Amino acid sequence: MQQQQAPPKKKKKIKVPKVINGVETMVEVEVDDEGGPVWGPNGKHAILNHRLTRVDAPLKVSGAAEYTYDKNPPGLLYGRVVRSPYAHARVIRIDTSAAQRIAGVKAIVGATNEDVVEGSNRAADVAEKKDNMDLGSAKAPQKKERIVRFAGEPVVAVAAITPEIADDAVRAIKIEYEVLPHVVRAEDAIKEGAPKVYPDGNLEPKEKRGDAAKVEASFKEADVIFEAEYRTPILHHSCLETHGNLVDYRGGDSATVYASTQGTFTIPGDAAKELGLKESAVTAVVEHMGGGFGSKFGIGIEGKFACQLSKQAKAPVKLMLTRKDEFLLAGNRSGSWQKFKAGVTRDGKVIALLATQYQLGGLGDGSQAGQPYIYTVPNFYRERISIHTNEDASRAMRAPGHPQASFGIESLMDELSYKVGIDPVEFRKKNLKDEVYHRQLDRGAREIGWERRNKTPGGGSNPLKRGMGCAIGTWGGGGGPQCKVEVGIARDGSVSVAVGTQDLGTGTRTYTRAIVAEELGLQINDVVEHIGNSKLGAANASGGSTTTASLAPAVKDAAVNARLSIAEKLSPLLGGAKPEEISFSQGRVAGGGKTLTWKQACAALPSAGITAHGEWKSNLQSRGVHGVCFAEVEVDVETGHTRAIKMVHVQDIGLPLNRLAIESQINGGMIQSLGMALFEGRVMDAALGLQLNPGFGDYKIPGSFEIPELVPLIDDEDKREAVIGVGEPSIIPAVGAVVNAVFNACGVRVRELPITPDKILMGLSDRRTV
Amino acid sequence: MKSFEWVSPTSLNDAVNLLKSAPAGDDADDVARAIAGGQDLLTTMKDYITRPTRVVNLKGIRGLDRIEGDARKGLRIGALVTLAQLEENTLVRSHFPGLAEAAHSIATPQIRNLGTVGGNLCQRPRCWYYRLEEVICLKKGGSKCYAAEGENKYNAILGGGPSYIVHPSDLAPMLVALGASVNVTGASGKRTIPLEKFFTLPSEGSIRRENVLQNDEIITEIQVPASSFAAHSTYLKFKERESMDFAISSVAAAVELSLAKVVKQSRIVLGGVAPIPWRATKAETYLTGKTLSADVLAETARVALDGAKPLAKNAYKVPLTQTLVRRALVKAGGMSA
Ligand SMILES: Cc1cc2nc3c(=O)[nH]c(=O)nc-3n(C[C@@H](O)[C@@H](O)[C@H](O)COP(=O)(O)OP(=O)(O)OC[C@H]3O[C@@H](n4cnc5c(N)ncnc54)[C@H](O)[C@@H]3O)c2cc1C
Ligand code: SF4
């Protein structure tokens, strides 16, 4: 084949993102320096860069798509976990005798020292820290102590023939605890004498950057010095499908795991370890999954329990977390508490910034992009510090750390712009080097009608007050070399593309087909994709918006190889035309003055058809995107209610593979962001250490009536002929845009999310009394 | 949910006897329960907050699912009438508009298709602490009200103590405003209870219950009398989230105006702010004989919230409810805002 015959390629080293537990770190890899396929100009595609309806839509709309939840093999058992009701406690005794007597209970794990599954879905470093602590405990040197560190931590799990019997068994298991002091509020956790979450204390420095002395000096040159604190609560991923797995292991030497996961290939290894099998003996199946948003990597604690239950019962066990479990123990977006002191000149330059950034990740570290984020501030000093509390560990959640950081700095910038009396858009431009932001700000402002903006926040006699705000974000979205794709063409003309990757609902299936169809001059439905199985070609986990930039280049490469391979076979029929000169378009294959239909062409193939393989090509993808959001809201100052009216998001993305899917991503990001701005937040009772709103009735995500007019705009000024992942950037700036719009509308600056009516009403009454 | 015995009687008599004869549970929340639409009962059972030994299905009893009457005689609403039926009924919509609005404001279309009027009046509180299986507060037989000192943003500002729940029903304030009463059948007979006397404050009735019903009693019918103000009734409900939310605060209002636009009589009942539908009698009295000017509305709103004692985190409910009182009266009085 053409490519294999080519002389050895020059190599170069580049840095690519590697996602661990949904968090990106950059690693160096060696890739080809030149050659290989190209996408060509963004405007010249027949299928790509158009609005493609998702190929799995009929299955999903009709309910035919089978999720892990829907799988019910014969002999299935249902798993449930027993959670600690205490935020911090020592397990003294576990009595399962009553539960064992319930008819239909088939397995109980975690009650003896041999099958303990500990902790939460925390990041690896945190687990290690905790292990050290357990070993260091003086009280029980020989026996490993069992300490629970948050209310909701699973201790034991049961499997029974119905979910209801499992639920009854959960209540029949008696666990005796020695209750230890806990702390669940960041401001309490940093107090002297606070209960210690970890032996080293509750504060964990993460980063120091900049020169504090220089910042202090440059405050002297500032015309205005301003200090403020901003806070966001812990948020939940709110995946429609809860975490869970169906582990089908009946005691033989192989097992199948149906998983609701963002990483098909993160499952077999984890499961094999629990089951005592070889990794290759475990097959993970992920045909359809109901959302992850960063929370579903690896088999998780619920998966470990499921494996052990299945092993004990020698029967398939489905352990899907209940919705309450999901809130309590499946991870969350860390909260934030940011303290700023900023110096700004009269002409609108922010010249000095001090930032203390607390990451509130419970047992986890939490995350926060460093300030001043996307802004250029000549002198800044920042410290990022984790504050630990007795709460479930944070996990990656759609653009980890960015919405928090963007909300903080964008609120600050907005406040500063009003302080010095400069239009917020102009003010931002003065402090942004990157011209792309200027371009996107101008486009967003035009689209929302920025000139109609309220000139006096809170002005006018009508209780319904409208206002506008804007904010900015950034993201990576590059890929890495992990995907192995196979394209097959059969003699009957059918085309398949296979790779083990997963579709989180983001449209992976659709563009995988589309790329192959485009390359072979076919229609999208002429291609069938096979994904979601660890026995297929390798693929990366879907975190950090890396899926598309990792997968699409490999699909393209495989499709090009398939095209060249079929062209080579057809050359004799097409007047001996060179394979690379044979054209494939509109279902026809042409060369050497002759034309064949696709069917005729395929009929000429050998009986085995054609199989071609593809790998990642760095030049087919890129990383680094911007993103600007504008929002218009209406605040009823007599009830405190905020209604979003319109949101506009401008997003650069390189080559948009499927415009409709990208618009949906942007819309989804704006909606989730609106939830963060106006509705969502975990509520904890400090004394009890319990979450008070672990359900969709009380943890309020936006519903259909809350959704404003959404305007997702793809920034086609971005001429990069390269694929970039865009799952995350649209959730970043919308929060700040809404918050700033609320201020512009009613004159109340809410510095602690969410902006609920009580805060607006109390804010208004405070202002009145001033 | 805890396993239970399911019975589906076809007569009222059998139903109340089945409620009466059920094996006694250990706790007030372990006793037999009637089930209608199940939209509330099932949520508490799934969370093991109620653990009935026997569940008595009312849906098999004939004749309780009708709305009858007319504008002159008033309404008779069967206890099994669904919320969807109520909001769509033309008689209700034209002559008791506030009741249709109240029904429409509840939950979601799916829940309104199943939830019934009787179940709506008898639903249990939504206080966060009540709804957590892990917490045994006063209302569940414990010794402490956790909301009093804890997270009480949604709790009562009026009539609270020692429990500070707010009654979650949206129909209740409106039905109280319309002067409704309920017909009840129990193992030892029938009685009719004015709805105003049906709900109990935690300081008066059993802290474990929100109304005067005995465990073997079933609501069979709600009677709404004809009145000179029913056609000028409205229900204004404030939700944090329009798509689905309980009332953070609500106002059921009805006014009768003279030709000269003077208030002859009015009803103002507050929801979402007290353990019972809170009738603002003083405000009603103040309003009588006045015209609905901006000043009068403001004063009525102030008087309606007289005596409010907010907890640490719910003071916002006072100005919020005052706004709703003014707006509800403007609407019921047929004025433009
Ligand atoms: C997500 C959600 C949102 C909701 N939002 C709202 C809202 O905004 N506003 C609102 O008012 N409600 C709301 N509800 C509560 C909703 O359950 C009720 O509105 C509904 O009407 C209950 O009726 P049901 O027939 O389903 O009651 P069931 O669940 O069947 O019964 C509820 C209780 O009443 C008792 N009961 C039922 N019928 C009778 C009877 N005839 N006589 C004596 N006792 C009886 C039962 O024993 C049980 O204790 C919501 C519920 C959910 C789940
Ligand atoms: S308000 Fe009532 S239900 Fe809520 S915690 Fe207090 S006693 Fe319990």
Image: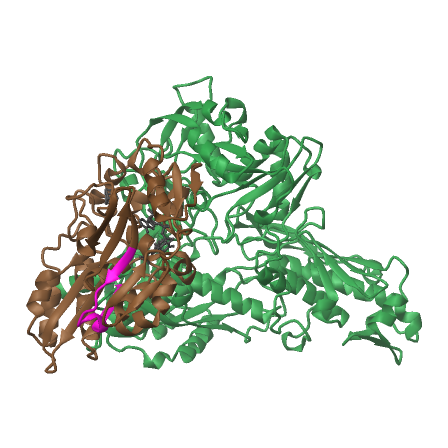
Residue A450: image quadrant is bottom left
Q: Which of the image's four quarters has the N terminus of chain A?
A: bottom right
Magenta region: which residues?
B221-237
Please state if A509 lies on the left or on the right of A606 as rendered. left
Task: Please give the name of the residue rendered at 23% of the width and 76% of the height, measured from the top-left corner.
Answer: A456
Residue A58: image quadrant is bottom right
Q: Is residue A143 visible?
A: yes
Chain identifier, green in the render: A
Residue A640 vertical position relative to residue B42 in the rendered view, above or below: below
Which residue is more in the foreground, B134 or B285? B285
Residue B25 vertical position relative to residue A512 in the rendered view, above or below: above
Q: Where's residue A278, x and y in %?
A: 69, 34
Task: Please give the name of the residue rendered at 35% of the width and 32% of the height, measured from the top-left corner.
Answer: B23
Q: Colour of chain B?
A: brown
Q: What color scheme is it?
A: by chain
Q: Is residue A618 magenta?
A: no
Residue B252 vertical position relative to residue A181 in the rendered view, above or below: below
Q: Is residue B226 magenta?
A: yes
Please state if A571 lies on the left or on the right of A548 as rendered. right
Residue A45: image quadrant is bottom right
Which residue is more in the foreground, A264 or A469? A264
